[in-house]
Amino acid sequence: MKINKICILGGTGFVGRHLTTKLANHGYSLKVLTRHPQRHREVEILPGAELVEANIHDPETLQEQFRGCDAVINLVGVLHEYSGQSFRAVHAELPGKVVDACRSAGVKRLLHMSALGADAAKGPSQYLFTKGAGEQTVMAVQDLAVTCFKPSIIFGPDDNFYNQFATLLKLIPVLPVACPNTRFAPVYVDDVAEAFEVALSNPATIGHSYELCGPKVYTFKALVEDVARMLGLKRWVVGLPDGLARLQGKIMGALPIKIFSTDNYLSLQVDSVCSRNGFAELGITPHSVESIMPMYFANQSQRRRYDALRQTAGRA
């Protein structure tokens, strides 16, 4: 099955930006769907990439946009619910619409992003439950060549996770952390993008679901402490007992801008580590946090010191 033209949903998000750049630079023709093309004009400078304004939740739109494509990649996911953006609509219902549109448009290849811990039967949070339902939908399909990926938390210089904690640690000397003993195996965004590209050219990946983890496991508390260390900051990271962690989720989840919620707290009841790391089967050696992020944070610190010196010298 030769793949030339690919339609990507979620191509303007964190993983999507890295994947579209990689695929475009390797000669694939891309169609990237988004509701807000004016916010993502950088996609249009990629060779062979087309940015299309589209409502991805409309079945007829999906069918129209998929027509003429050899493969579809669905990266769409949300960590928080807002008005008009529910876990069920994004994670559980959209994959079914994608499958139907692939059939109608004659697309034979589908790559789907799930999440480590996703489980339609026992997922403790709506995030993990609906992610599991979407994965179950696509993996049950018999007439499409489907591959699924289930990463742990994904990191990179332009991520939200590490940068969010970096911002908090710069602002406050004491940072309370919910569920401090929950374990993660952070995975580098470019390694995840490479896994998708490998699957496109390797028919042996069809019908398989791959867990993706980095080479090192951290507790949540240790992970945040590691961010402080990389920033060169002396900070006190305090692990919250379960009752306070649940309360933190309830209070912060009621804020207009969500950083943490009760559903996030429930997701943290499950370790995000691999039972079998799919990178080995895909022939990829995953990068560690230590090989990527310290240099990024060091450059940030250098820029801040330089800006401070300029201000002091009156040249800001």
Image (cartoon, rainbow, N blue to C red):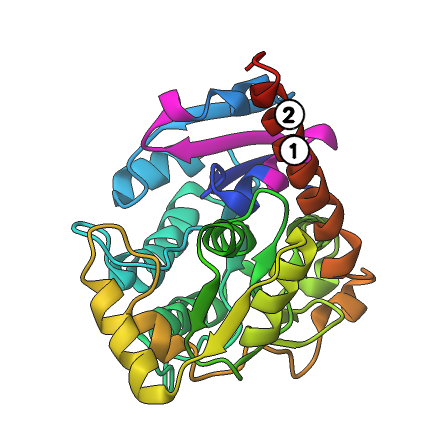
Q: What is the quadrant of residue 262 in the picture?
A: bottom left
Q: Does the magenta stretch include residue 36?
A: yes
- Return the residue nearer the eye: 105 or 200: 200
Looking at the picture, tell me which residue is in the foreground, 43 or 143.
43
Residue 47, compared with residue 187, is above or below; it is above
Q: Is residue 106 visible?
A: yes
Residue where numbered disc 2 is placed = 309
For badge 2, the amino acid type reads Leu
Compared with residue 251, is residue 26 higher up or lower down, i.e. above or below? Answer: above
The residue sitting at 44% across, 57% down in the picture is 172
- Decide: is 288 above or below 106: below
Q: 105 left or right of 298?
A: left
How packed mark 2 is, by other alpha carbons closer than 10 Å (few <14, some 14-19, many 20 or more), is: few
The quarter in which the C terminus is drawn is top right
Q: Which of 176 and 55 is in front in this view?
A: 176
Do the numbered discs 1 and 2 sit on residues whose CB atoms are within 8 Å?
yes
Residue at left offset 23%, top offset 52%: 85
In the rendered view, does 84 fall on the left or right side of 136? Answer: left
Indicate yes or no whether the magenta region holds residue 24. Answer: yes
Q: Alpha-carbon distance for marks 1 and 2?
A: 6 Å
Q: Where is residue 281 in the image (x, y as percent from the top left)?
A: 78, 69
* Relative image position of residue 166 (x, y in whole percent): 54, 52
Image position, residue 126 (x, y; %): 30, 73
Is residue 152 at all visible to an observer of this figure? no
Task: Residue at 51%, 56% (x, y): give it.
Answer: 169
Magenta-tinted stretch? 18-39
Residue 260 position, x and y percent, is 34, 64
- Which of the numbered marks, if any, corresponds to residue 305? 1
Res 87 → quadrant: bottom left
Amino acid on which the number 1 mark rests in the picture: Arg
Dot 2 falls on a residue whose secondary structure is: helix
